[in-house]
Image: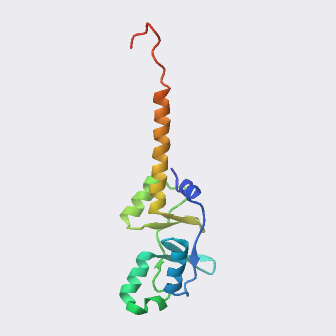
């Protein structure tokens, strides 16, 4: 399965934020939209990614003033990205090796979406379910030996 197929299953809704916004605003968006990451856009280009991990680091760093900190000061700048034609196994390996739960999917300079580890797990389950149904159907329809045929 390719990354573009995972995006097709997931849908291509993107949640974004500007780098000059505050972390409190970012957390409000993440909570309202029930997402774990926001793509940071500046001047029409991806500037970085903000995930709950960066928010927790900012909380640790800034204490009770974390909410006033800027997204730009907390985001993961220049994040790892995936290509739409990347195989799912390669994507999983990249996410595991680099401890990244969210990867932007880039087609050259165009942001296609964000794939989460949850999206990958869901795609694996759907792919396995499809394969299981196909195998069961194949076994169920296996031709029975005709009378007189030796097995």
Q: How is the image coloured?
A: rainbow
**In the picture provided, is 16 more to the left or to the right than 56?**
right
**Which residue is painted at 45% across and 39% down in the image?**
132
Percent position (x, y) of residue 97? 36, 63
Closer to the camera, 10 or 73?
Answer: 10
**In the picture provided, is 148 more to the left or to the right than 20?**
left
Q: In which quarter of the image is residue 39?
A: bottom right
**Which residue is painted at 57% across and 73% down in the image?**
15
Compared to residue 127, the image places residue 52 above or below, namely below
Percent position (x, y) of residue 77? 48, 78
Closer to the camera, 111 or 109?
Answer: 111
**Which residue is painted at 51% across and 50% down in the image?**
1
Give the quadrant of the C terminus. Answer: top left
**In the picture provided, is 122 more to the left or to the right than 61?**
right
Percent position (x, y) of residue 142? 47, 24
Farthest residue to the top: give it.
148
Q: Quadrant of residue 110?
A: bottom right
Compared to residue 133, the image places residue 104 above or below, namely below
Compared to residue 64, the image places residue 3 above or below, namely above
């Amino acid at each position: 399965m390719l990354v573009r197929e995972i995006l097709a299953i997931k849908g291509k809704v993107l949640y974004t934020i500007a780098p000059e916004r505050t972390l409190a605003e970012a957390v409000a968006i993440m909570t309202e939209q029930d997402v774990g990451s926001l793509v940071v856009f500046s001047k029409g280009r991806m500037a970085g990614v903000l995930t709950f991990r960066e928010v927790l680091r900012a909380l640790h760093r800034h204490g009770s003033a974390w909410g006033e900190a800027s997204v730009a000061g907390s985001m993961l700048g220049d994040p790892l990205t995936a290509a739409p034609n990347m195989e799912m196994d390669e994507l999983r390996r990249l996410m595991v090796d680099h401890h990244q739960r969210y990867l932007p999917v880039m087609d050259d300079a165009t942001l296609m979406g964000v794939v989460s580890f949850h999206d990958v797990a869901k795609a694996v389950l759907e792919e396995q379910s499809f394969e299981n149904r196909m195998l069961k159907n194949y076994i169920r329809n296996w031709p029975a030996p005709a009378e007189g045929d030796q097995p």
